Image (cartoon, rainbow, N blue to C red):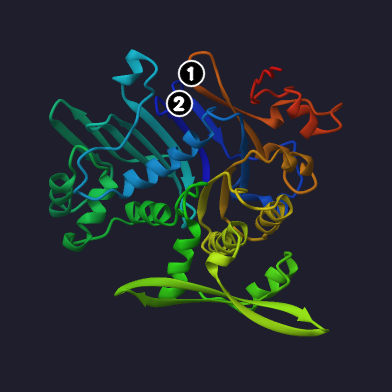
C-alpha cells in the first residue's frame, strides 16, 4: 500500500507536492473497512477522491502513478525516460523531475524509492528498505555509479551494471536480465511484484470494455451467476446472461458480445438476444468496471481512475464506491478524480472526510493539492453546497453573459 508520494517538476506539479494516504488520527469513521494499519501507528486509507475544475491538474496527478509504474518496469529498448517537466517556466522546463514514494510491498516491508530524472537519463536513484539504504545510483556526465548496501555476487553486479542504461531504472535492468542472473535479489523482486500489481489507469477515453471482453475470451475472467444476480440488484433486472466469443469476419477475428435480455409479454417471460452494439455505453462500462473493481480487491492491487463515473448513473457510481469501501481485510487502494460532487454528501455516511481531496491551479499555472480534512466543518450543513459556493476552493470560476 502507498503511504505517500511526493513529486516536483512533473507536468503541472512545478513545486514540491506531497499526497499522503495516511488516515486522519482524529477520524475513526469506517476504520475497519477504509483504513489499514500496515505497521504500528501507520494507518493508511484505501480510498481517495480528487476534485477540482477542468485543467486544475487532477489527471496529471494520476499520471504520476502511471509514469512510475511504466518507468520502473520499462524494458531495455526504450529510448527515453518518458518524463515531462513543468513547461511554463524556462528553468523547470530544462530541469530534473523528482519523485519520492513510500509504500509497503506485498511482504509488508516498508520501501522508499527516490528518483531524479530528466527526459534523457536518470540523474539519481535510491531505494531504502525498512529505513535502511539498499542501493544508490548516481550519474555524473556519462558515468553512472551504482552502490549496493548488501552482499551481492560480483557476476550479478557486473550484469546489472552492464544492463542498466542511462534512461532506465535499476529495477527494469534487473527485470530484463533475471534469466541471466545467478541469484535473485528478494528486495528488488518485492518492488517489481508490487508495481506489476498496479492496474492500468482508467480514463474516460480508455475503452475498458474491450479490455475486459478480451479477458473473457481468453479465459482470464468468466461470467458467473453471481455477477448476473448482482446486475439484477443494481438495476439491470432484465439481463439474464452475457456471452463473449471470438468470431471471424472477412478473415479477421473479432470479439462478439451478446446479451440475453428478458422481458415479460402477456405475463410470460421471453428472452431475446441482443449484440453489444445494441446496449448503452453505460451498461457496457458498468460491466467492465464491475470486473475491474472485483480484480482490484481480489489482488490487493492499486488503481488510479480518471472520472470513474463517466457514462454511469450517479446511483450506480455510488454503488461501485460502496462495494469497494465496505470490503474488509483488503489492502487494495483506489484513487479517483471525479466531478460528481454528490459524493461529498456521503461524508461520514459512505466515505471519510480525509478521503476527499482537492486540486487547484494557482497563478503560476501549477497545481496544488489539499484535503477536506483541512477545513472546520462544524457549521457546514451541506458539504456539497459549501463546495459549489466555493468555500473550499478548487471550483471553476465562470462568468455568465446575456
**How far is the residue under mark 1 from the one under mark 2?**
7 Å
The residue that mark 1 highlights is 365
Asked if residue 23 is positioned above or below residue 1 in the image, the reply reads above
> Residue 120: in sight, yes or no?
yes
Name the side, left or right, on which 266 lies relative to 116. right
Residue 170 occupies which quadrant of the picture?
top left
Label 2 sits on a secondary structure element that is loop
Asked if residue 99 is positioned above or below residue 157 in the image, the reply reads above
Label 1 sits on a secondary structure element that is loop
Residue drawn at point x = 77 percent, y = 80 percent:
264
Name the side, left or right, on which 147 lies relative to 87. left
The residue that mark 2 highlights is 12
- What x and y, as percent, mark residue 291? 56, 64
Residue drawn at point x = 80 percent, y = 29 percent:
377
> Residue 44: in sight, yes or no?
no
| Count of numbered circles on the image | 2
Amino acid at each position: 500500500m502507498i503511504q505517500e508520494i511526493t513529486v516536483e517538476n512533473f507536468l503541472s506539479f512545478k513545486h514540491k507536492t506531497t499526497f499522503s494516504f495516511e488516515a486522519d488520527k482524529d477520524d475513526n469513521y469506517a476504520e475497519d473497512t477504509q483504513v489499514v494499519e500496515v505497521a504500528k501507528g501507520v494507518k493508511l486509507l484505501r480510498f481517495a477522491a480528487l476534485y477540482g475544475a477542468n485543467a486544475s491538474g487532477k489527471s496529471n496527478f494520476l499520471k504520476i502513478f502511471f509514469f512510475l509504474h511504466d518507468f520502473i518496469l520499462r524494458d531495455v529498448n526504450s529510448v527515453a525516460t518518458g518524463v515531462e517537466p513543468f513547461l511554463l517556466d524556462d528553468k523547470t522546463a530544462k530541469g530534473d523531475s523528482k519523485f519520492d514514494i513510500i509504500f509497503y510491498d506485498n511482504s509488508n516491508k516498508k520501501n522508499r524509492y527516490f528518483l531524479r530524472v530528466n527526459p534523457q537519463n536518470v540523474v539519481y536513484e535510491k531505494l531504502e528498505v525498512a529505513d535502511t539504504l539498499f542501493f544508490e545510483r548516481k550519474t555524473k556526465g556519462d558515468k553512472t555509479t551504482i552502490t549496493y548496501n548488501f552482499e551481492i555476487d560480483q557476476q550479478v553486479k557486473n550484469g546489472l551494471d552492464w544492463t542498466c542504461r542511462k534512461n532506465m531504472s535499476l529495477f527494469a535492468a534487473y527485470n530484463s536480465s533475471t534469466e541471466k542472473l545467478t541469484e535473485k535479489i528478494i528486495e528488488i523482486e518485492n518492488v517489481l511484484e508490487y508495481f506489476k500489481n498496479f492496474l492500468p489507469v482508467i480514463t474516460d477515453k480508455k475503452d475498458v470494455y474491450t479490455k475486459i471482453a478480451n479477458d473473457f475470451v481468453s479465459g482470464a475472467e468468466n461470467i458467473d451467476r453471481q455477477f448476473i444476480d448482482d446486475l439484477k440488484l443494481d438495476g439491470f433486472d432484465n439481463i439474464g446472461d452475457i456471452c463473449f466469443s471470438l468470431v471471424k469476419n472477412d478473415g479477421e477475428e473479432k470479439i462478439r458480445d451478446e446479451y440475453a435480455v428478458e422481458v415479460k409479454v402477456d405475463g410470460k417471460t421471453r428472452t431475446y438476444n441482443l449484440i453489444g452494439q445494441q446496449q448503452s455505453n453505460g451498461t457496457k462500462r458498468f460491466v467492465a468496471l464491475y470486473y475491474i473493481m472485483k480484480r482490484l480487491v481480489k489482488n490487493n492491487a492499486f488503481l488510479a481512475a480518471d472520472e470513474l463515473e463517466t457514462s454511469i448513473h450517479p446511483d450506480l457510481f455510488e454503488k461501485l464506491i460502496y462495494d469497494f469501501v465496505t470490503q474488509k481485510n483488503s489492502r487494495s487502494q483506489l484513487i479517483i478524480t471525479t466531478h460528481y460532487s454528490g459524493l461529498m454528501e456521503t461524508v461520514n455516511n459512505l466515505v471519510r472526510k480525509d478521503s476527499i481531496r482537492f486540486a487547484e491551479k494557482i497563478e503560476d499555472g501549477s497545481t496544488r493539492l489539499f484535503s477536506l480534512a483541512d477545513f472546520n466543518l462544524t457549521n457546514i450543513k451541506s458539504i456539497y453546497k459549501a463546495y459549489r459556493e466555493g468555500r473550499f476552493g478548487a471550483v471553476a470560476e465562470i462568468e455568465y453573459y446575456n
